Image: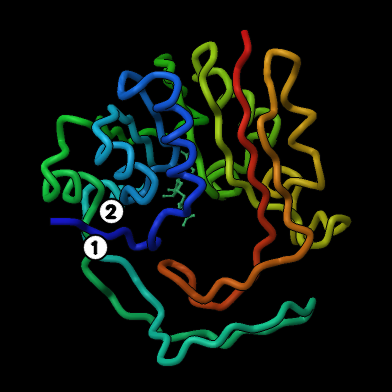
Amino acid sequence: MKTKSIWGHPPTRLYNLIKLAENNWGKDFTACVVGCSDGKFLMPFAREGIYVTGYDIDEIALYGGSKLFPIVESKVKYKYSKDFKSKEYKLEKRKVLGVLDRLKKENLEDFAKIEKRDFYRNFPTEKFNVVFTSCSLHYSANKDFSLEDKIKKLQSIVLTNGYLYVDYMMAIEEDDYELYPSSKFFRKKEILNYFDSSWEIISIKENNYPSFEGAHVDCVRDHFHRFGYILARRLK
Ligand SMILES: C[S@@+](CC[C@H](N)C(=O)[O-])C[C@H]1O[C@@H](n2cnc3c(N)ncnc32)[C@H](O)[C@@H]1O
């Protein structure tokens, strides 16, 4: 039985990354998703028969329980404006499956190891061929670490010739350090400063404009994000 993440379906770029790694190593490689939540980006590896490790700090996303969801009767997509004010939706409690329940329901437990771990505070020693993280660096839990520190920690668990993929949040207003603190939101091309000559940048895309995101689990308001994506390979 196929299960679904509370965060929706993974984007094509995840499947492209899996294909890229398979072109190198077949199924014989290891992957790690830092901030795996309920498995949006982890399940596709396990479904492919690739051994994947997931770390997260959110017990409900790992073990299941209930979470608050906004009650959105009709979805409206708004255009960005600096003083956009969303209404505050009412919330309802819904039962959610954790990543462990999802692995069990899909008979994939042998392909994954899940650990409750605050990655930046309690750093693992294990290294992987593919390391992936999506929209996790900006979490308040990580505010005591600089973006450089967080990127270096992610890099250090990538094996030689392995890949690091990071989806990250960028400042919508580059000069506004109050709304977009430097420990959470990247400035344009900033991330490139944190990859030295041991890395080859395979691709980087940074959106110039914010994209709309409707209220979602744990978030009562419609809002905007500006995203960046980087894929790099460790050369040595
Ligand atoms: C926003 S969710 C992922 C949602 C999905 N990335 C998406 O794009 O729709 C990011 C996850 O990272 C986890 N996370 C944040 N900081 C972490 C840390 N220091 N260690 C482990 N997990 C962390 C959060 O608990 C959360 O489950």
Asked if 7 appears above or below 145 in the picture, the reply is below
In space, the residues marked 2 and 1 are separated at their CA atoms by 8 Å
* Other residues around mark 1 within 10 Å, as few (<14) / some (14–19) / many (≥20): many
Identify residue for label 2. Answer: 60
User: Which residue does the image show at 44% across and 27% down from the upper left?
Assistant: 21
Amino acid type assigned to the residue bearing label 1 in the image? Val
Q: In the image as oriented, which residue stretches furthest toward the right?
A: 175
Image color mode = rainbow
Left or right, 219 with reference to 64: right
Q: Quadrant of residue 125?
A: top left
Residue 118 picture location, percent across and down: 43, 35
Disc 2 and disc 1 in contact, CB within 8 angstroms: yes
Identify residue for label 1. Answer: 96
Q: Quadrant of residue 25?
A: top left
Assign a secondary structure to mark 2: helix
* Other residues around mark 2 within 10 Å, as few (<14) / some (14–19) / many (≥20): some
User: Which residue does the image show at 68% across and 36% down from the upper left?
Assistant: 147
Q: In the image as oriented, which residue stretches furthest toward the bottom?
A: 74
